[in-house]
Image (spheres, grey):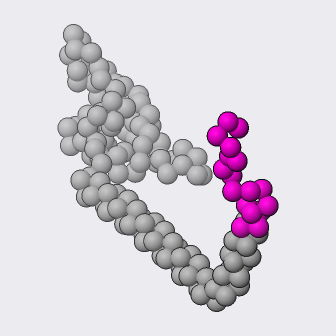
Amino acid sequence: MTIYRNLTVVGLPDQVANVLRNHSTAGTLVAMTAPRRVSPTDPRIRVAVRLLDTTPASQPVTSLREHITNRVQPARRQRIRRHIAIATTAAAVVVALVVAVAYLVGQLVAFLVDNAALIAGFLAVAALILAALRGATGSGKRHCPGC
């Protein structure tokens, strides 16, 4: 007696192609439908398949979903590229911050140089006002030891 399993395989095109290729090579792929997109914005595809069930009755059947998630790993090259992209982005952010701080410090120095006379005048007036206020209230010392 031949037992078939009807399943729906959902995943990225490479993942679905890998599962279908494995079952075709093993001789368990009986039929399949044309691939359909899950949704217009989702890159995953869906394929209905009919497989020949070759598992012994005592062994539990593992799902294709577990096969896809556990056995199909992202390529090592993609991980390296992702790390390079993250490092490049972080370096660009650090450089942009350093350039922004250097620009602002340059603007501050230019402002101070251009307005040095005005700033010195304000500081001199403030010093004179403080000296006058201090002189009006006295020296701040007690006039006798008992007070």
Q: Which residues are magenta?
A: 131-147
Query: 117 or 113: which is nearer to us?
Result: 117
Find out whether residue 124 is within the magenta segment: no
The correct choice, above or below, for 101 with respect to 38 in the image is below
Residue 86 location in percent, x, y? Answer: 38, 59
133 falls in the magenta region: yes
User: The N terminus appears in which quarter of the rendering?
Assistant: top left
Position of residue 143 measured from the top left corner of the image (x, y, whole percent): 70, 47
Residue 47's place in the image compared with 54, above or below, is below
Res 70 visible: yes
| Percent of width and height locating residue 75 | 26, 52
Residue at image point 59% right, 87% down = 113
Q: Residue furthest top?
A: 58
User: Which quarter shows the C terminus?
Assistant: top right
Q: Hey, which quadrant is residue 116 in on the image?
A: bottom right
In the displayed structure image, the side of residue 45 where residue 125 appears, left or right: right
